[in-house]
């Protein structure tokens, strides 16, 4: 049986700095998973319905051209193939072994693979770390066994591997996908089964289809490399539940995404990681935040649902990327046009007005009641000819980078003829064309024509706009210049001494004076500050600094000073300073009797400027992250912040600033002077460098960092650090 003809094609992945896909050494063992010349099925069965039977049947049914060796100790023949009692009885060399035996027999099978010289193995069997306890211990033994034998392994607890170019179905899935250009991998075998069945129903084609299961050996990183090097794969799609080596993942992903689009869906995006956090930064950084930041920095397109995953894949598989953000919408109905326009307004796409010359051309054949703006409404009685002429005219206008064609099935329109006209014009342009023929029964023939000719057709305008927006985002990613990473000269030795001193005292939290010294070592501008141990010292300090002043408790046991009455601001004379000293110490002793009080900080009161917050937090997968946002209510209530994994480039620091919803307040509104954005960028880069230099920093906040008007710099008013004890 020959695999069906290709109908759709897709692929997905990420990028890394000095590394490029062509420089990566191709692993020949991975090739054996996709194009083996011979396969042994250990645990092959004579009984229909058994996994070992389904695997052999799938290999044979779809015209796999290589040799197949069923291994079963009691059978002579399985599905017309000679069976062997054990692997070592097979007289010929074997490229790929598929193991489908009970978990307690898997290690023995792997041992035979090693003796036979097989370097690639798929373990279908479940009952490993996903079951906990004994299963986890067994999987550790499996990992050690394959490492000693030099074997690459997919699984365990997986569905198997499919490669349509090789006519290989080394899985127990029900069916074989059409040949196409989408590479897909998934940690969930059940999701693989559902997606495969859906793809067969929708005629979506795949190049590679891989269930990676528990990822004992082969991971999403290996598959990204393999699919990036695969000429049959145009788009890489993946479902992941977790990443063990975040740094390597980001490096490989950056490189791959520069070559092919990578589209991932991530499950399990909870805020569990933030529960124990004590800083603002840590409390706002759940696992989903880290993945969002990592994907953004690697050029990965992040799908929020399986539906979105394949919405994007369909577009990327068949259409060129837009050269810019300008979209023209052609519709035969006002309502869908407005829906599409609203969706564009929520995206990075733009809907420019139709130029006057083009409007005049449209007037020559459209009814007077048509709308010549954008969306272009060609009225409900539009037929195929009106769609064709309008599309030709818009395609010829250089202002527009892409076109979205909407159709509702009125009595006047011939669905199939309209679809054929659109296909004909689409073949003459390098601009992406998306369609949304809304409805179901009547528009089905038109959608089929689009599908057969590689034009994405969606049931709803919002999906088409989302796909176009993702494609424009990829164009922006590919057009980005090489990232610049700055190294600023700082006093790291001073910081090292402070951290060593804190560690010797068996503390994790730095007091304010120590935090100030850290910031000073990294070149942050700071308000004048003096530590006072008595009322008299506090009055003297205030006099030296100059009124008004701020006073704060200095204690490693008080993290959020204002919550305990540990701060006073706007102190304008000696009496106020004396009262504040007494009030602060009394409040803290009353509420935290065992707190270590090291004194009272008297600080210059900085007035004017805008408050922002910067922070460091550590993610378990990706390491240190930097946070930026406006201070006060914007971080406390609105959580209007942005994150990036370190190191943060100059370009990424600028993007962080512009990414927050309240950025217009920094840019200046209603006559206000713009804030010093260069100073914010420098502060982000300094903090990124600090996080790299000192991985022992668990959490840190600079809150507030007071940003002066443009060209006047920034002052770090307050800060806190928590390091590893």
Image (spheres, rainbow, N blue to C red):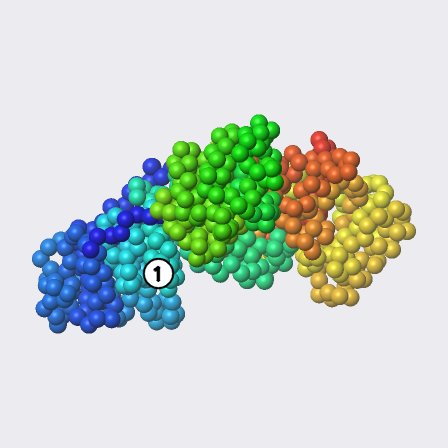
Q: Residue at x 70, y 37 (%)?
A: 667
Left or right? Give the position of 523 relative to 99.
right
For the N terminus, the image quarter is bottom left
Residue at 38% x, 67% y: name it: 130
Q: Residues within 10 Å of mark 1 (few under 14, many from 20)?
A: some
Q: Nearer the viewer, residue 623 or 350?
A: 350
Q: Is residue 125 above or below residue 648?
A: below
Where disc 1 sits, the SS reads: helix
Q: Name the foreground residue: 155 vs 332.
A: 332
Residue 191, given in percent of the width and then of the height, sits at: 39, 61
Q: Position of residue 500 (x, y in %)?
A: 57, 49
Residue 484 lies, in percent from the top left, at 52, 33
Residue 417 in view: yes
Q: Residue at x 60, y 37 (%)?
A: 368
In this orientation, does residue 117 appear? no
Residue to which mark 1 is pinned = 197
Q: Is residue 174 left or right of residue 282?
A: left
Q: Position of residue 355 (x, y in %)?
A: 59, 30
Determine whether, in the image, residue 597 is placed left or right of residue 312. Answer: right
Drawn side of residue 318 relative to residue 484, left or right: left
Q: Which image quadrant is residue 198 in?
A: bottom left
């Amino acid at each position: 049986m020959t695999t069906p003809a290709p109908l759709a094609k897709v692929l997905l992945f990420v990028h890394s700095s000095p590394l490029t896909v062509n420089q990566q050494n191709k692993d020949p063992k991975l090739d054996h998973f996709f194009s083996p010349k011979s396969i042994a099925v250990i645990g092959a069965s004579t009984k229909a319905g058994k996994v070992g039977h389904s695997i052999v049947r799938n290999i044979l049914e779809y015209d796999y051209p290589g040799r197949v060796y069923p291994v079963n100790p009691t059978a002579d023949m399985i599905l017309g193939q000679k069976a062997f009692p054990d692997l070592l009885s097979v007289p010929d060399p074997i490229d790929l072994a598929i193991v489908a035996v009970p978990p307690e027999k898997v290690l023995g099978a792997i041992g035979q693979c090693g003796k036979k010289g097989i370097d690639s193995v798929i373990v279908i069997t479940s009952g490993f770390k996903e079951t906990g306890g004994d299963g986890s211990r067994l999987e550790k033994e499996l990992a050690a066994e394959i490492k000693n034998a030099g074997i690459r392994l997919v699984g365990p607890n997986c569905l198997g591997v499919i490669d349509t170019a090789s006519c290989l179905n080394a899985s127990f899935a029900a069916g074989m996908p059409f040949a196409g250009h989408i590479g897909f991998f998934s940690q969930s075998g059940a999701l693989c089964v559902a997606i495969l069945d859906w793809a067969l129903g929708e005629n979506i084609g795949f190049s590679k289809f891989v269930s990676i299961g528990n990822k004992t050996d082969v991971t999403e990183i290996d598959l990204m490399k393999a699919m990036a090097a695969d000429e049959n794969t145009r788009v890489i799609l993946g479902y992941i539940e977790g990443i063990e080596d975040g740094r390597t993942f980001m490096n490989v992903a950056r490189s791959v995404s520069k070559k092919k689009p990578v589209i991932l869906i991530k499950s399990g995006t909870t805020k569990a990681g933030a529960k124990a956090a004590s800083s603002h930064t840590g409390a706002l950084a759940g696992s989903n935040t880290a993945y969002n930041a990592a994907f953004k920095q690697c050029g990965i397109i992040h799908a929020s649902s399986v539906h979105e995953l394949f919405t994007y894949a369909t577009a990327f598989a068949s259409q060129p990327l837009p050269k810019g953000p300008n979209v023209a919408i052609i519709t035969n109905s006002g309502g869908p046009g407005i829906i599409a326009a609203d969706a564009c307004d929520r995206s990075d796409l733009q809907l420019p007005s139709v130029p006057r010359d083009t409007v005049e051309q449209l007037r020559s054949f459209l009814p007077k009641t048509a709308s010549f703006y954008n969306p272009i409404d060609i009225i409900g009685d539009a037929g195929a000819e009106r769609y064709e002429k309008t599309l030709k005219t818009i395609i010829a206008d250089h202002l527009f980078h892409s076109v979205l064609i909407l159709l509702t099935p009125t009595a006047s329109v011939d669905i199939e003829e309209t679809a054929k006209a659109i296909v004909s014009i689409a073949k003459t342009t390098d601009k992406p064309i998306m369609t949304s023929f809304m409805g179901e029964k009547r528009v089905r023939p038109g959608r089929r024509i689009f599908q057969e000719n590689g034009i994405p057709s969606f049931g709803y305008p919002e999906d088409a706009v989302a796909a176009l927006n993702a494609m424009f985002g990829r164009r922006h990613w590919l057009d980005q210049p090489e990232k610049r990473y700055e190294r600023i000269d700082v006093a790291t030795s001073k910081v090292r001494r402070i951290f060593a001193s804190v560690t010797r005292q068996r503390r994790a939290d730095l007091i304010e004076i120590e935090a100030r010294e850290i910031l000073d070592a990294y070149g942050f501008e700071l308000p004048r500050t003096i530590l006072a141990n008595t009322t008299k010292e506090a009055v003297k300090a205030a006099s030296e600094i100059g009124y008004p002043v701020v006073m704060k408790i200095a204690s490693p046991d008080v993290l959020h000073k204002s919550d305990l009455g540990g701060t006073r601001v706007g102190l304008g004379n000696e009496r106020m300073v004396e009262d504040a000293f007494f009030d602060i110490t009394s409040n803290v002793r009353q509420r935290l009797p065992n707190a270590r009080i090291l004194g009272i900080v008297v600080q210059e009161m900085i007035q004017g400027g805008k408050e922002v917050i910067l922070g460091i937090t550590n993610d378990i997968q990706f390491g240190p992250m930097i946070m930026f946002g406006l201070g006060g209510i914007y971080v406390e209530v609105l959580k209007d912040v942005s994150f990036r994994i370190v190191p943060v480039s100059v370009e990424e620091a600028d993007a962080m600033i512009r990414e927050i919803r309240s950025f217009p307040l920094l840019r200046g509104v209603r006559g206000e002077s713009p804030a010093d954005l260069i100073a914010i960028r420098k502060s982000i880069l300094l903090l990124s460098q600090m996080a790299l230099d000192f991985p022992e920093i668990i959490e840190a906040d600079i809150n507030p960092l007071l940003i002066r008007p443009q060209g006047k710099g920034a002052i770090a008013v307050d800060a806190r650090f928590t390091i590893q004890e």
